[in-house]
Amino acid sequence: MRYDRLTSQRERKMKMDIKTVRDEATLILQISGRVDTKTAPQLEEVVSNSLDGVKLLIMDFEEVEYISSAGLRVLLIAQKTMNKQGDMKVNNVNTDIMEIFEVTGFSDILTIE
Amino acid sequence: MDNNERYIFESIVSDMSDGVFVIGFDGKISLCNKAAADALNTDNNDLIGKSVAILMNEFEENDEFFELLLDAVYTKSKVIKTVPFRTDGQMRYLRVTTSFLMKGEEKIALVAVISDNTDPVELFIHNKRLANQVIGLMNSFVEVMVTETEERSAYNADHTKNMVRYAVRYLDWLTGQGRLTEFTMENTAPFIMSIWLHDIGKLLVPPEIMDKPTRLGASLKDVMHRIEITKLMLKTKMMTSADKKDELQKWMDDISEAANFINICNTVGSLDEASRERLKKISELKCITSDDEVVPLFTAYEYESITVVKGTLTKSERMMVESHVTFTRDLLAKMEFRGDYRNVPMWAASHHEMLDGSGYPDGIKGEDISWESRLLTIIDIYEALTAKDRPYKPPVTPEKAFAILRDMCGAGKLDRDILESFYESGAWRDCEDGFNCSRPQRTYRRKAEIMYEV
């Protein structure tokens, strides 16, 4: 029985949602939940398919609870792409994730507002 | 830290065999010794001043390693883990321990200590692979031998195979419910092995007893042969001794009737008192051999066999069949079962023990009978009852089988909780109607599982 509870907890935590808002050359990705090994490919797909003609990419991290190295890697890919065609910003980062950005040096690479 | 302390600290770190690097909360690697750089297959001057972000970019395939560093930051605690690390097409295993460098109450940096664990991990993987090969060989060997041995028997040839199928399904069901650990069974393979081996002792029971189809079995031919010779001898005598013709004719009639009656009694399910009386009278009849010698109609063994009240086995034959569990125990005691497999002989040899102590061979009871043996016993009886190629009775339906098993629980012989859980699992259901329908119907009737005849 304990097993069932653990599973459902894990399933709940595994979820990630992305809302995309496109306004001409600006793309806003409102991400919520956990960006981990399981869910990062979903974000990567959005990043690699939606950046055509985007001059400003805003990642709204208000609802993000957790980001793993796989998630950071997607941020790295997005940043590299946007370096060539415009700007990228990461907004509304909570303190836990800010700490991750700082320790890993991502705060130097990303523009965090 | 004064200069002296700093010097001591730095020389310890630079000379130690474990790799050490320190990541400041500014995100940069502020200290790194040679061993750490070696472990990451790079130069230590290369690492200082770099951030994790830059390293992630350089070591693209090593997210497990970086994940571990992130874990330490998230959980704000010490993390110890062995992770794979790939460089230049080589896979190595690094054991990483993280901690925080504190200045008073404040964390100022993340410290990671790395040791190259590739050799032990590869040795472990190699050992595991070897162990799996040995276990795989052992499992398939047992499976093939047991299956082939059972196929030789005319009855219930798939008994063990069916039991394994029921058990595997039941254990899967328990796992699905998250309940397997209730029974402290992390590894189900030894239990399955004990099912494969539970009847191995039958190898030592003579097949003519194990598969004895009728009361007289192969002896029927001897008895009938004796009667036929007697009849021929009587006919000859009648021709030569006309004065004794009536007496001889009566003898002939008695013997012929006896032959018919013996044939009936030989296959009937259970013998009533009247039949036994009549057989006693028949046993007093005499036969004549071709050497004109007068002998009793039955030998002692034949008489004991034909007068068996229920089933086909005499007392000593029954004991012989029952001793298959002792043979199982003795055979398995000669084999090496260790570690997870240490209980296999005990589980296998206790499958006829009953909770109330009425079972055999040891008559142990209650707590002395393990959960595994209790389950094995239930599955054994269920399979024996529902088998289509049962000795001298048609198969019972699953419902009837469970009714019999429940009665046995009521009598204190079987574990009711296990039985009801097995029932609930549906692991016993083979087709829609629940019968063991995968098996061919056999025409023989008889044999040894009579201990379960109810």
Image (tube, coloured by chain):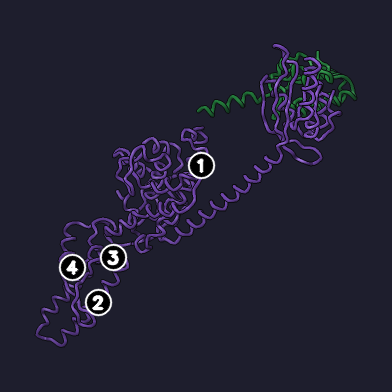
**Which one is earlier in the sequence, the residue at label 2 or at label 3?**
3
Q: Are marks 1 and 4 on the same chain?
A: yes
Q: Colour of chain B?
A: purple
Is B308 left or right of B422, judged from the image as shown? left
Question: Are discs 2 and 3 both within one chain?
Answer: yes
Mark 3 vs mark 1, CA separation in Å: 43 Å
> Residue at point 18% right, 78% down?
B294
Mark-to-mark CA distance, 1 and 2: 59 Å
Please report the residue visible at 21 percent of the width from the left and 78 percent of the height from the top: B230
CB within 8 Å, label 2 to label 3? no
The residue sitting at 90% across, 23% down in the picture is A85
* Chain of the residue under the numbered disc 1 shown in the image: B
Mark nearer the N terminus (1 vs 2):
1
Which residue is labeled 2 in the image? B228
Q: Closer to us: mark 1 or mark 2?
A: 1
> Mark 4 or mark 1, which is nearer the start of the sequence?
1
Foreground disc of the pair 1, 4 = 1
Q: Is residue B189 left or right of residue B62?
A: left
Residue A107 x %, y %: 81, 18
SS for dot 3: loop
Q: Do labels 3 and 4 share a chain?
A: yes
Q: Mark 3 points at which residue?
A: B216
Q: Please, what secondary structure does the residue beneath circle 2 have?
A: helix
What residue sits right under mark 1 in the picture? Answer: B188
Q: Earlier in the sequence, mark 3 or mark 1?
A: 1
CA gap, disc 1 and disc 4: 55 Å
